[in-house]
Amino acid sequence: MLTRLEVQGFKNLLDVQVDFGPFTCIAGANGIGKSNIFDAIEFLSYLATDSLVESSQRVRGASGVRGGDPRDLFWDGYRDHQRKITLAAEMIVPAVVEDDLGASAAATTTFLRYEVTLGYSAPEGEGSVGRLSLLGEELRHINRGEATKHIRFRHSVKNFRNAVVLGQRRGGAFLSTEVREGGTVINVHGDGGSFGKPQPRAAVRAGRTVLSTVTTNDYPTILAARREMQSWRRLALEPSALRAPDSLTDPRSLDVDGRHLAATLYRIANEKDPISGRVDSEAVYARVAGRLSDLVGVGVEGLAVELDRVREVFTLFLQEKGGLRLPARALSEGTLRFLALCVLLEDPSFTGLMCMEEPENGIHPANLPAMLDLVKDLAVDPNEPPDDANPFRQVIVNTHSPGVVQLCDPDDLLLADIKTHRTQEGEVTRALSLLPYSNSWRAVPPVPVFTRADVVYYLAAPEGAQLQLPLEMLG
């Protein structure tokens, strides 16, 4: 779980600090860069797996496409000046993880803060391109006694926090940066704290973050941080992927674009119930169908996934109340996206952080409450311990929809807006800010906030509206 994100010098995020809870909705106008928050989170996830070059190419560039110039990632990156990006993430990591060889490892402590600083190395010769360079990297623990200062969203200390914030550490950092005569090195420290000699890695020669090189259980807490960051994904459900057929050899877990929907539901429906130990496919299908029937205008009698052994494909069928039997590929885009989220809700193996762009897309206004309730239900309940019935999932969405904003709990809202900032050089400029609601748990002075007056355009009917409810129906 990502509890706090700090970004300096990344795209239009000159200086952003934001706290996250299980569910967060970022609201703001089109084109102001609120998707760059998702880009920063996604970039951190890539840095935990890929090289610096690959990570920079996988993030959207200034033009919205991937594989662009690395300078696209830097604040004012095309000016002739020193470029630097600093990213920091406070996170709750898994207590037990599996390394790349299949061996399990237990983290020393599960509440961590990771920081990475990147620079830009200019092209060294004609025909070459610039690249990212590693300037510093830190991974430190946050003591259980300090957790109350860092986990500020409303939660149960007994049921939730004590179940996820585990272990302790008396030593220093797990990763630390040291400047030596020969250059900057990243020191890798063992879980034993002050025992054992740190392993130095030269930053200047590093083609990737040091965290991304930890693949075995020799450094279990660093590996746990890496696994947590790898679980941060951007969910972008595409109708073409949702409609694609699944063969018997395809993965049986939903991809970020929605591919393998039928195979995923088939796997969930045929798994043993963790409590009863029995397979109850009908109960799984009934729960998904029941949730899908929350959509206005969709009359669901039932649904199921059928295996065609001749063609070796899975097909998801929906049975309408009128008797019509439809394959999933015949459903509308909005219904398919809603169905995919219903399937994820049933999948306890789908954990981690999900970033979702405009979940209201393709959804009829009458179905916005059902969609928002479903998205919020995907997130972990912070009043109960995480388990198969309460998967440890986190959801962040962005939107420009007044309907979504009006349905959100103010505690869950952040307003994305362009505000005046002062750079380290003393220049006054404008950059993205994320403002919490004035009476929410994030509103701790001197944090700037927004009030209802700042979001009147989300709460009031547009100027010139000709169809409105009578006042007696509104009151």
Image (cartoon, helix red, strand yellow):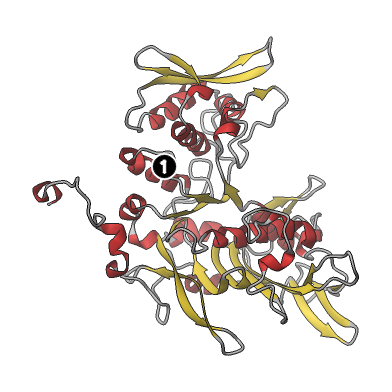
Query: Which residue is the extreme one toward the left?
Result: 472
Question: Looking at the figure, which quarter contains the N terminus?
Answer: bottom right
Q: Residue at x 70, y 22 (%)?
A: 248
Q: Vertically, is 104 above or below 174? A: above
**Observer-nearest residue: 439 or 327?**
327
Q: Position of residue 240 (x, y in %)?
A: 58, 32
10 Å crowding of disc 1: few (<14), some (14-19), many (20+): some
- Which residue is denoted by mark 1 in the rendering? 374
Q: Position of residue 82 (x, y in %)?
A: 72, 81
Q: Position of residue 221 (x, y in %)?
A: 71, 62
Q: Residue at x 33, y 50 (%)?
A: 403
| Circle 1: element type | helix
Query: Which residue is the extreme one toward the bottom?
Result: 426
Q: Position of residue 217 (x, y in %)?
A: 79, 56
Q: Vertically, is 24 above or below 308? A: below
**Observer-nearest residue: 20 or 370?**
370
The image quarter containing residue 118 is bottom right
**Observer-nearest residue: 397 or 36?**
36
Query: Which residue is the extreme one toward the top?
Result: 310
**Observer-nearest residue: 470 or 260?**
470
Q: Vertically, is 457 above or below 237? A: below
Total count of labels = 1
Q: Residue at x 71, y 68 (%)?
A: 71
Q: Answer left or right for 241 relative to 403.
A: right
Residue 280 in sight in this render? no
Residue 332 in sight in this render? yes
Q: Amino acid at mark 1?
A: Leu
